[in-house]
Amino acid sequence: MRTVWDGVDQLLDAAESDSAVAVHGLQLLALRRWRETGRPVPPMWLDDQRLMSVVTLSLPTVLRRVREAVPGPILLMKGPEVACLYPDPALRPYGDLDLLVRDTDGARRSLVEVGLSLVEELPDQDRHHHSRPLRLDPLPLMVELHRRPNWFPWLPPPPVEELFAAAIPSRLGVEGVSTLSPEHHALLVAVHGWRHGPLLSLGHLLDLALLAQECDFDELLRTAERWRVRRIWETSLLAARSVLLGEGSSLPLLVGGQHLRRVRERSIIGTHASVYFGTLWMPSPTVTARALTHLVSTTLRPLEAQSWTSRLARLARVARRSTRPVSTYRNIEM
C-alpha cells in the first residue's frame, strides 16, 4: 500500500528546481532522499540541516524556560508538534514556537523578566492573533504567544476554552506543556494553510495528511461543521490525498494545484488570485461577500506609518512583477 512518504519521495524524485523544493518546505526531506539516490544536494540545504539540528536540540530548553515563567495552561501548536509525526523531527523546518496562552501580555512580561528578548518585526507583520515574538538568545527559536488561533477575520474563531478543554499532552514530553487535540490541530492547520493561499504548499498538505491520520473523522467533521470550515477541510484533505497518495482529484486541484504535482512555485499573481478565489469556499454567500470586502480593504489600505501615495506605489511595483515567484514578494522595494 502506498504511504504518504512514498508520495513525498515520488514528488522529490521528479522535482526540477531546488528553490521550489525549499519554497514548499521539503528541502530537508529532499536532502535525505537525494543523498539516498545519489542526486547532488544544494550546499545551502546543509546550512538548513545544521540549523534544524540546533533548533531540535534547543527546543526542550526553551519550552522549559517558558513553562517555568508562564502561569496557566500552555498549548504548543504546529511546527514542533507536527514534526514529531515525521520520520525524524529535524526533517520538518520551523523557526518558532506557536504557544496558545490565556494572558499573552502577562506571559510576555514574565518571559522578558527571565531573559527572553523581543524580536524586531517587519513593517507589515500581521500580529492580530499573537503578540510580538520573543527569543532566548543565542538560541535560534522564536516564541510567539497567541491569544487565539490564526483564523479567518470574517468568521468567529474557535472558542479558546474549547481548545484548552480538549488539549492533550505534548508529544515532546515537556511536563506542563500540552497540545491541541488531533481534530482541532488538523482543522487549524487546514485554515492556516488556506489563509496563506488555498493549496499553496506541499509542506502544508503534508502536515495536514499526517495529522488526519491521528483523527477521529466523525468528531473532526462535526467540529468542522460547527466551526464553519467543513468545505475547506474536505477540499484540502482531498488535495493532500490526491497529491501524496494518488487518491482521486478535484476541480480546485486541477485548476489551481498543478504547481503541487510538479513541485513548482506559484507566481505572485497566482497566489493573490487563489486567496480571493478561496473565499468561494466560505460557508455562505454572505460570508464570501464579507471576506472579499475584507481582502480588498486590507490589500489597498496603507500599512502603519505608510501614506496612500507610497502604498499605491508599492502595489504598482508588485503588479509590474506579478508573474515572478511568490518567494520574491518581500524583496520588492517596500
Image (cartoon, grey):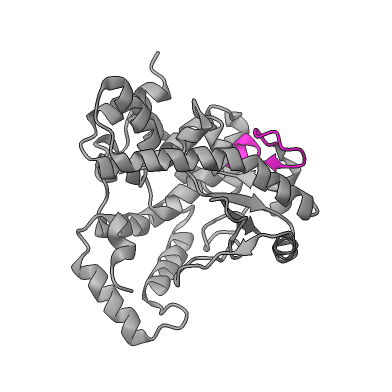
Quarter of the image that includes the N terminus: top left
Task: Pinpoint residue 218: horizontal percent, then vertical percent.
Answer: 60, 30
Quick one: 192 or 120, which is closer to the camera?
Answer: 120
Quick one: 111 or 199, which is closer to the camera?
Answer: 111
The residue sitting at 34% across, 32% down in the picture is: 30
Name above or below for residue 245 compared with residue 125. above
Name above or below for residue 154 compared with residue 333. above
Q: Is residue 113 left or right of residue 221?
A: right
Give the residues in magenta. Answer: 169-186
In the rendered structure, does residue 176 fall within the stretch colored magenta? yes
Task: Pinpoint residue 113: horizontal percent, then vertical percent.
Answer: 74, 64
Q: In this view, does 145 lie to the left or right of 278?
A: right
Total label count?
Answer: 0
The residue sitting at 49% across, 52% down in the picture is: 283
**Residue 186 showing in the rendered view:** no
Based on the displayed image, in which of its 4 quarters is residue 167 positioned? top right
